[in-house]
Image (cartoon, grey):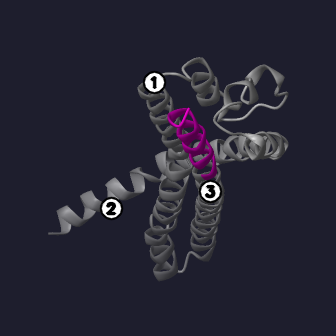
Amino acid sequence: MEALTKVLYWISTGLMVPVIIFLIAMFVKAILVLGKFYGDYVNKMRFRKELQTVLAKADKSNIVELIDIDKYKAKSNILPALQQLHLNNQSIPHCEKAIADFEIEADRDLGQSKTLTKIGPMLGLMGTLIPMGPALVGLATGDIASMAQNMQVAFATTVVGILIGAIGFITLQIKQRWYTEDLNQLDFIVELFKNK
């Protein structure tokens, strides 16, 4: 039994370096996702006003002219789907495929935030628990310096893991709202095509 517990101890302590490396990599990824999110937010706010103005004037007779994409200056995640709707305005199956493609792309974009939300706290927890064993050994042997160093690592990994999860969660919540709004607008345009 003692041999098995030693093997488990070696495995867990051997995971400390990979956990820290993955935690740092996930933190860098979280910063990149946050930067992209900010850019998307700025473009979304610019594009949203233009698109809402267009859709407020839309009816089945003028929808094709109104969604002419070339006049939009801002970039948005909805633009490729709008371009497909503009090109295939007479074909309802093609329009529905464009919406399905948009949903797939939205799910791919949301996947990054979902990964951060789940993996960040898991790595943080692993980074907390792994150094607790050596810290307790240091406490039992009276090596306070070793205990303090291990506790510092434990707390740092917890904070970074929770921060990664928070970035993922916040961006996920807002992006889900954006994509729901975009899908609603795309469905509205396709319904106008159906009633032509």
- At numbered mark 1, what does the secondary structure look like: helix, strand or loop? helix
Query: Does 160 sit above or below residue 47?
Result: below
Quadrant in which residue 79 is drawn: top right
- The magenta-colored residue range is 181-196
- Image spot of residue 178 (x, y percent): 65, 51
Magenta stretch, overall SS: helix
Q: Real-space Cα distance between discs 3 and 2?
A: 45 Å
Q: Is residue 63 magenta?
A: no
Residue type highlighted by circle 3: Arg
- Image spot of residue 28 (x, y percent): 66, 43
Q: Is residue 182 magenta?
A: yes
Q: How many marks?
A: 3
Which residue occupies the foreground of this view, 160 or 180?
180
Query: Which residue, given by chain and number where applicable, does mark 3 sit on?
Result: 177
Query: Which residue, given by chain and number where applicable, does mark 2 sit on?
Result: 9
First in sequence: mark 3 or mark 2?
2
Q: Residues within 10 Å of mark 3 (few under 14, many from 20)?
A: few
Tell me, for residue 94, which label it has, or none: 1
- Image spot of residue 177 (x, y percent): 62, 56
First in sequence: mark 3 or mark 1?
1
The outermost residue toward the left is 1
Q: Real-space Cα distance between discs 3 and 1?
A: 25 Å
Quadrant in which residue 44 is drawn: top right
From the viewer's perspective, is the residue at label 3 or at label 1 nearer?
Answer: 1
Q: Residue at x 48, y 78 (%)?
A: 141
Tell me if 56 is positioned left or right of 196 in this view.
right
